[in-house]
Amino acid sequence: MSFKIYTKTGDKGTTALIGGTRIPKNHIRIEAYGTIDELNSWLGTINDQITLVDIQQVLKEIQDRLFTIGSSLACDPNKDTKMHIPDLLETDVILLENEMDRMEVGLPILKNFVLPGGNLAASNTHIARCVCRRAERICVSMQQENEFVDEMVIIYLNRLSDYLFMLSRYILHQNNGIETIWNPRLKKDQ
């Protein structure tokens, strides 16, 4: 027996959290895990555009962690769901840090801001970085509005955006691309 993808339960602009509580689709909690879903889709796109097997494996691991984050954000924090939700661990953050350290070894020292671009995969990685920062901002806003967000979620997203910046540089340099340094236009009287 197959299940239909459409349920019609959201036709009036609400959706259910894990635990059954219905909330408006524009609720900050929905915005948070929807942004995580968007980020995950960008990582899938990047993974399809690169041939670096070591990076592809790490991106798959990150995509798995993003499903973990999405699950955490989709839970009603005021209900016991009786459902096992995967945990985000400190070792997940350490993986990102170790990967950044590994990639940095072969990159030129960065002394200026760089413009996003150089090749499609590097550009898309910059987009993913921006989406990740947005997800982080939304989660911080949730905390400020007294909506529960696991502290590890914000730490992981912060580190992930750093990782994505480093990854964009790494992808570009692995493909013999050239970084475009930002040269700010200064006022003539300066």
Image (cartoon, rainbow, N blue to C red):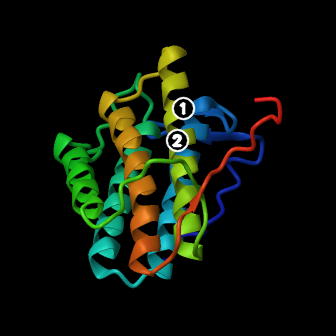
Residue 173: percent from left, percent from top:
42, 73
| Residue name at image x 44 percent, y 63 percent | 169
Would you place residue 79 above or below residue 135 in this image?
above
| Residue name at image x 62 percent, y 41 percent | 15
Query: Left or right: where does residue 109 sit relative to residue 132?
Result: left
Query: Where residue 149 is drawn, which disc sits there?
Result: none
Residue 33: percent from left, percent from top:
52, 44
Depth check: give the residue in front, 145 or 110: 110
**Which amino acid, mark 2?**
Arg
- Neighbour class for label 1 at 10 Å: few (<14), some, many (≥20)? some
Quarter the C terminus occupies:
top right
* Residue 71 visible somewhere in the drawing: no
* Residue 8 visible somewhere in the drawing: yes
Q: Residue furthest right?
A: 188
Instruction: Check whether the beta carbons of the residues at disc 1 and disc 2 lie within 8 A of each other.
Output: yes
Depth check: give the residue in front, 128 or 153: 128
Q: Residue furthest left?
A: 91
Would you place residue 143 above or below residue 29 in this image?
above
Depth check: give the residue in front, 52 or 118: 118
| Residue name at image x 26 percent, y 75 percent | 54
- Neighbour class for label 2 at 10 Å: few (<14), some, many (≥20)? many
Gap in Å between the C-alphas at discs 1 and 2?
Answer: 6 Å
Would you place residue 167 above or below residue 45 in this image?
above
Residue 99: percent from left, percent from top:
25, 59
**Which amino acid, mark 1?**
Arg
Query: Left or right: where does residue 39 sit relative to residue 104?
Result: right
| Residue name at image x 53 percent, y 72 percent | 178
Residue tagged 2: 133
Say what secondary structure mark 1 lies in. helix
Residue tagged 1: 137
